[in-house]
Image (tube, rainbow, N blue to C red):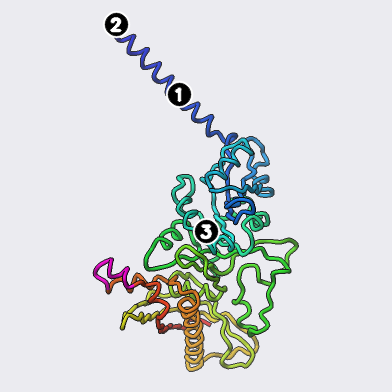
């Protein structure tokens, strides 16, 4: 009997100790002790190696207006430091709270910093067990601090939700791409492809571009982030185009239409608009809504150490344009329109591909994966040096467009 009582007392003490330590752990990570970072910015420091900007949710622990506070006034704090870890440590001391990165939705690098080697920062971010692999990577044409200070929720009640929706426009415009930390890291570390990133900027009247040397049809799709002639009452951020990397460094930018070509070549497009000159009426245009089919083809051949690359994107199209000059299209006219659209698209994709090869010298379209099949051993593939070979590549684009509705 005495033995049973002892066991019972020991059990009670053990349970009490477990609850005690759990409560201590809970108090340590209680919401009142945490500051939630929803976006993280990297700039070149003025007085140190790095300038870190933290956009912190203003969510309160007990306020009934907490959702409104998070939406209207997310805080941006900046610190100069030598590393991400030191910057977090300094900021923790300043805020008297523990910065929590588990809800960080967007990681922003300035173009100035991205033009250098950012691999150390990417490896550090991947190694951090709080930062999610699906956080988006964005390259800002202005400083990351300025970008965050002007980044405010639009048509969203929560700032964190706003950052989740920013890259999703790629699904219905094709003018940007949903690039995550995981995707960027894999491509940066890979031997046969290079990464891209979302391109962002702050849109203001000073940053608008006219493109006087382009036709009216080409102007709308030739913008990059910050250049569109959108009029609004305040400065706002926008994400159009992509930042192109070679290995760990930024080497160039893609316009809206070049980004669309990139998504077509990598078969990552859901739907997109294609505006072409009207082959029947001078000085007018026709807009087609393209939807990919399952007949996409891509192939790479190596001839005398030179890559010969063929791409065949395949689309069904609806005619969106209609006005008093729109012809009542018969089968022959539809065939003419299809051929004209194919010729126009082939020309634009070819221009884009040769730009990545000759100007950027960067394979961002994953052709290297197709070329690697010709090499039995890893050393042979590494000795071939795909990045150098890609500079001399030849391209053949054979797109197909079938108009199914007008």
For the residues marked 3 and 2, what is the alpha-carbon distance in whole angstroms?
66 Å
Q: Is residue 203 visible?
A: yes
Which numbered disc, 3 or 1, marks the residue closer to the eye?
A: 3
Q: On the image, numbered disc 3 is attached to which residue?
A: 137
Q: Which residues are magenta?
A: 375-384
Q: Which mark is residue 130?
A: none
| Whether residue 128 is situated above or below residue 223 in the rendered picture | above
- Queried whether the magenta region covers residue 198, the answer comes back as no
| Whether residue 157 is situated above or below residue 350 in the rendered picture | above
Q: Main secondary structure of the magenta part?
A: helix
| Whether residue 303 is situated above or below residue 111 in the rendered picture | below
Residue drawn 34% across the image and 78% down it = 300
Q: Which mark is residue 1?
A: 2
Q: Secondary structure at mark 1?
A: helix
In the image, 340 versus 86, the foreground residue is 86
Which numbered disc, 2 or 1, marks the residue closer to the eye?
A: 1
Q: On the image, numbered disc 1 is attached to which residue?
A: 19
Are there few (<14), some (14-19), or many (20+) residues within 10 Å of tag 1? few
Q: Secondary structure at mark 3?
A: strand
């Amino acid at each position: 009997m005495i033995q049973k009582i002892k066991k019972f007392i020991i059990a009670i003490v053990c349970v009490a100790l477990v609850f005690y330590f759990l409560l201590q752990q809970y108090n340590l990570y209680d919401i009142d002790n945490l500051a939630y970072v929803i976006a993280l910015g990297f700039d070149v420091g003025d007085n140190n190696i790095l300038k870190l900007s933290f956009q912190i949710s203003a969510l309160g622990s007990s306020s009934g207006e907490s959702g409104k506070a998070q939406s209207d006034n997310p805080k941006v704090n900046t610190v100069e430091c030598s590393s991400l870890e030191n910057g977090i440590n300094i900021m923790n001391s300043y805020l008297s709270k523990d910065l929590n990165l588990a809800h960080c939705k967007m990681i922003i690098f300035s173009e100035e910093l991205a033009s250098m080697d950012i691999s150390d920062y990417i490896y550090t971010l991947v190694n951090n067990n709080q930062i999610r692999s699906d956080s988006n990577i964005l390259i800002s044409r202005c400083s990351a601090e300025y970008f965050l200070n002007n980044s405010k929720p639009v048509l969203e009640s929560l700032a964190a939700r706003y950052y989740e929706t920013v890259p999703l426009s790629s699904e219905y415009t094709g003018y940007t791409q949903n690039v995550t930390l995981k995707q960027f890291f894999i491509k940066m570390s890979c031997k046969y492809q290079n990464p891209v990133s979302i391109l962002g900027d702050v849109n203001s009247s000073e940053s608008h571009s006219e493109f006087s040397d382009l036709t009216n049809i080409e102007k709308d799709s030739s913008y990059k982030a910050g250049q569109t002639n959108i009029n609004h009452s305040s400065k706002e951020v926008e994400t159009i185009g992509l930042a192109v990397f070679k290995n760990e460094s930024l080497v160039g930018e893609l316009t809206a239409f070049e980004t669309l070509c990139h998504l077509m070549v990598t078969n990552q497009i859901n739907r997109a608009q294609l505006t072409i000159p009207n082959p029947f009426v001078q000085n007018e245009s026709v807009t087609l809504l393209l939807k990919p089919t399952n007949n996409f083809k891509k192939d790479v051949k190596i001839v005398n150490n030179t890559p010969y690359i063929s791409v065949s994107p395949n689309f069904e199209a609806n005619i969106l344009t209609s006005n008093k000059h729109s012809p009542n299209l018969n089968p022959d006219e539809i065939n003419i329109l299809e051929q004209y659209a194919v010729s126009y698209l082939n020309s634009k994709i070819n221009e884009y591909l040769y730009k990545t090869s000759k100007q950027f010298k960067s394979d961002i379209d994953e052709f290297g994966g197709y070329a690697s099949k010709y090499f039995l051993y890893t050393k042979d593939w590494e000795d071939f040096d795909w990045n150098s070979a890609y500079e001399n590549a030849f391209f053949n684009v054979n797109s197909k467009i079938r108009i199914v509705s007008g």
